Image: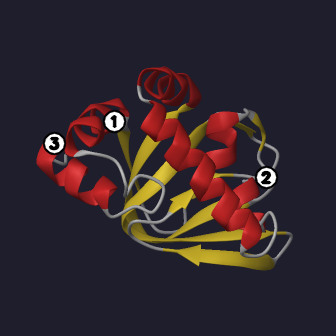
């Protein structure tokens, strides 16, 4: 298990949360659940109902759809953020490449935090806008 300070330091290096104050990061870090998965395991599969986002704390994952690799993500990267904002069926499969530790945030917790911290909502919106501008709705974002 990660200590609160370790979670805060990790989240402060994650693009979607990087501009938040230490106090907001501490509150945010308490809302995440730690998930450990071994290499070869699916975090989720295409078509699964999704209502949470993940931050890679350690390890690497492969985002893929029908044999096509969409992305390989490592520590401090995020996936599934759209499902944390608008729960839907997953549009791709995410498979663990190396034993991994994730921080998972469910949509209820994200909405609760955003309602109390406007700066979090602004960061999430900016993050999604940047991803969209950098190449449209990238497939890894849609999972």
User: Could you tell me which residue is drawn at 30 percent across and 57 percent down?
Assistant: 12
Q: Earlier in the sequence, mark 2 or mark 1?
A: 1
Q: Dot 1 lies on which element?
A: helix
At horizontal 44% and vertical 55% (from top left) the residue drawn is 55
Specify the label residue 4 is tagged with.
3
Q: On residue 46, which mark appears?
A: 2
Mark 1 nearby-residue class (10 Å; few <14, some 14–19, many ≥20):
many
Rendered location of residue 109, percent (x, y)? 47, 25
* Whether residue 86 is situated above or below residue 93 in the rendered picture: above
Q: Quadrant of residue 98?
A: bottom left
Q: Nearer the viewer, residue 138 or 104?
A: 138
SS state under label 3? helix
- Of residues 97 and 112, the one drawn nearer to the viewer in this rendering: 112
**Residue sitting nearer the eye, 99 or 32:** 32
* Residue 8 in the figure: left or right of residue 122: left
Instruction: Please provide percent x and percent y for residue 29.
Output: 29, 39
Asked whether residue 3 appears in the rendered view, the answer is: no
**Alpha carbons under labels 3 and 1: distance apart:** 10 Å
Query: For mark 1, what is the residue?
Result: 28
Left or right of 120: which side holds 1?
A: left
Residue in view at x 50 percent, y 48 percent: 123
Q: Is residue 133 shown to the viewer in this render? A: yes
Distance between the alpha carbons at the discs numbered 2 and 1: 28 Å
Residue 28 placement: quadrant: top left
Quadrant of the rendered image containing residue 86: top right
Q: Earlier in the sequence, mark 3 or mark 1?
A: 3
Q: Residues within 10 Å of mark 2 (few under 14, many from 20)?
A: some
């Amino acid at each position: 298990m990660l200590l609160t300070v370790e979670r805060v330091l990790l989240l402060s290096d994650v693009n979607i949360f990087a501009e938040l104050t230490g106090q907001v990061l501490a509150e945010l870090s308490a809302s995440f659940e730690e998930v450990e998965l071994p290499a070869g395991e699916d975090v989720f599969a295409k078509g699964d109902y999704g209502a949470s986002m993940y931050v890679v704390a350690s390890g690497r994952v492969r985002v893929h759809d029908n044999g096509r690799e969409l992305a390989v993500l490592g520590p401090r990267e995020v996936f599934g953020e759209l499902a944390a904002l608008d729960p839907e069926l997953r549009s791709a499969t995410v498979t663990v490449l190396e034993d991994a530790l994730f921080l998972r945030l469910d949509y209820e917790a994200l909405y609760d935090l955003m309602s109390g911290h406007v700066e979090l909502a602004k960061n999430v919106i900016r993050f999604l806008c940047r991803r969209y501008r950098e190449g449209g709705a990238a497939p890894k974002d849609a999972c």
